[in-house]
């Protein structure tokens, strides 16, 4: 999956000349915490609630709340916005967006085209949603976690054949390697989870966990 699949395409932006109070009103109106700043559609910065809070804290020295609020009504986005903002392209793998956000401790990445026009935005919540979708946790069916003490070629084929012969379809599968051991998580379309677990145990597999998905 790529960034385009999970990004928000209809992005609300502000310009450098936008007053900070107007930008804050936009954030409140749309329940946003960050707004890309553009010039002729091209990204030039990012305004966040944290940036505004930090700026307000700097203004607070020796001033009362009324004076601070007055100064904010005169402050433009260009004066406090974050510049040199990390970005990503829409055709990049979503995993790369997650890596950048983790490594740089970011909550959001503007998505831009080759000319730096803003075409979308992706947030940490989008990454979480993608992870849940990828694992099938919200889908109907059952989940089983198998412990594989000695991984070797053909295990996935063997598991697939066992379930196929029982007319059970695998909808999601992923492998987690833990040192010399591996765990295989299966999402299957059958809700009788204990029946599936017993079938796999009978074939010699260790079933660590078996549950019907909670959101059905």
Image: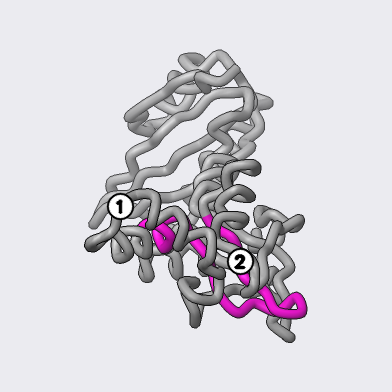
Query: Residue shown at 69%/69% (left/top)?
Result: 90
Determine the residue positioned at 30% across, 52% down. Answer: 64
Quadrant of the image for the N terminus? bottom right
The x, y position of residue 211, in whole percent, is: 45, 20
In the picture of the structure, the residue carrying the numbered disc 1 is 64
Q: Nearer the viewer, residue 91 or 192?
A: 91
Residue closer to the observer: 21 or 10: 21
Out of 177 and 152, give the one closest to the viewer.
Answer: 177
- Residue farthest to the bottom, as pictured: 115
Quarter holding residue 118: bottom right
Q: Residue at x 49, y 53 (%)?
A: 124
The image quarter containing residue 99 is: bottom left
Check disc 2 and report the residue beneath it: 36
- Identify the secondary structure beneath mark 1: loop
Mark 2 in CB contact with mark 1 (< 8 angstroms): no
Total marks in image: 2
In the depicted structure, whether residue 146 falls above or below residue 56: above
Q: Which residues are magenta?
A: 34-53
Going from the N terminus, do you reach mark 2 or mark 1 first? 2
Q: Is residue 1 left or right of residue 137?
A: right
Residue 15: x %, y % from top left: 67, 71
Q: Is 32 part of what is drawn in magenta?
A: no
Crowd around label 2: few <14 · some 14–19 · many ≥20 (10 Å): many
The secondary element bearing badge 2 is classed as strand
Q: Please identify, in this view, whether the residue under mark 2 or under mark 1 is nearer the observer.
A: 1
* Front residue (pair 83, 15): 15
Residue beneath the point at 49% across and 72% down: 81
Q: Magenta: predominant secondary structure element?
A: strand
């Amino acid at each position: 999956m790529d960034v385009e699949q999970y990004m928000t395409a209809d992005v609300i932006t502000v310009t450098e000349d936008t007053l900070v109070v107007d930008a804050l009103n936009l954030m409140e109106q749309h329940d946003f915490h960050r707004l890309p700043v553009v010039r002729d559609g091209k990204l030039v910065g990012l305004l966040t609630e944290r940036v505004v809070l930090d700026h307000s804290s700097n203004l607070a020295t020796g001033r009362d709340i009324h004076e601070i609020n007055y100064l904010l009504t005169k402050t433009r986005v260009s004066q406090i916005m974050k510049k040199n903002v990390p970005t990503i392209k829409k055709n990049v793998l979503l995993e790369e967006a997650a890596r950048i956000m983790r490594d740089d401790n970011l909550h959001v990445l503007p998505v831009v085209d080759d000319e730096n026009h803003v075409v979308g935005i992706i947030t940490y919540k989008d990454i979480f949603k993608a992870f849940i979708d990828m694992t099938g946790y919200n889908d109907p069916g059952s989940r089983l976690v198998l412990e594989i003490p000695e991984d070797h070629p053909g295990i996935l084929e063997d598991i697939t054949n066992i379930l196929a012969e029982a007319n059970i379809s695998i909808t999601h599968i992923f492998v987690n390697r833990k040192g010399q051991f591996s765990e295989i998580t299966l999402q299957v379309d059958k809700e009788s989870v204990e029946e599936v677990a017993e079938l796999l145990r009978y074939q010699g597999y260790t079933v660590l966990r078996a549950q019907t998905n909670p959101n059905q």
